[in-house]
Image: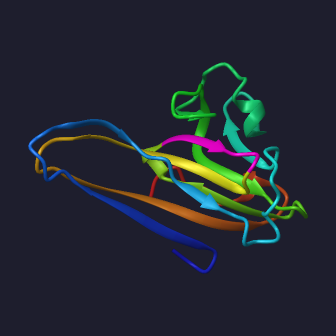
Amino acid sequence: HDETSIDYELHFDNGSEMTFTGVTLQTCCYLKPSEWFSQTISDNKYVRTAAAGWTPMFEAVKMEPNGKYAVGWRTGPKVCDLPWILTKSVDGNHWVGMTWFEDTLSFIGNPGHPCVHADPLVGDLKPGQNKTIKGRLAFFTGDDPDKFDLPATL
């Protein structure tokens, strides 16, 4: 994309004679190599909710469903209104964001590991059908995520 982000793709091709239904994945961005994001904590992961704006993920999971994207797990409450999860750095002025844009299903984190997850929904694949989904990993500087360029679609 540019010098502060990386675009990525996953390609799926159903070469079988069966229909695959409800295909989902878990995708992890392991942050340990970066001193800014290597903490094993959960309160540095943020999602945007319609009810409260940018909210720590483990607070958002307790909210009433009022969004398009799930938090906490693939079957967690749909409280997020933007398909991005952000991780805040130790100094609070650097962020990394992860998305699958309109193919985002859910967001999770693991307090025991310095990682962040934006999990995609592939959906159904009929025999012979293929699908490509696109995502982005982006880096931001600043203290206000509302000022970051976080598109909902590619």
Task: Report the predominant secondary structure element of the magenta stretch.
Answer: strand
- Give the image location of residue 135, x and y in percent: 47, 59
In the image, taking residue 126 as reference, residue 40 lies left or right, namely right
Q: Residue at x 52, y 34 (%)?
A: 74
Q: Residue at x 82, y 44 (%)?
A: 43
In the image, taking residue 72 as reference, residue 88 lies left or right, namely right
- Give the image location of residue 60, x and y in percent: 72, 31
Residue 54 sits in quarter: top right
Tell me where the magenta segment starts and ends, as one range.
105-112
In the image, taking residue 87 as reference, residue 16 lies left or right, namely left
Query: Which residue is more in the foreground, 115 or 101?
Result: 115
Q: Residue at x 64, y 75 (%)?
A: 4
Q: Is residue 111 magenta?
A: yes
Residue furthest bottom as drawn:
3
- Give the image location of residue 125, x and y in percent: 22, 43
Total number of numbered discs in the rendering: 0
Q: Residue at x 14, y 53 (%)?
A: 15
Query: Which residue is more in the foreground, 121 or 153?
Result: 121
- Give the image location of residue 73, x and y in percent: 58, 34
Relative height, residue 67 to residue 46 (above, below):
above
**Scheme of colours in the image:** rainbow
Relative height, residue 88 to residue 23 (above, below):
below
Query: Which residue is more in the foreground, 128 or 85?
Result: 128
Residue furthest front as drawn:
112
Q: Is residue 14 magenta?
A: no
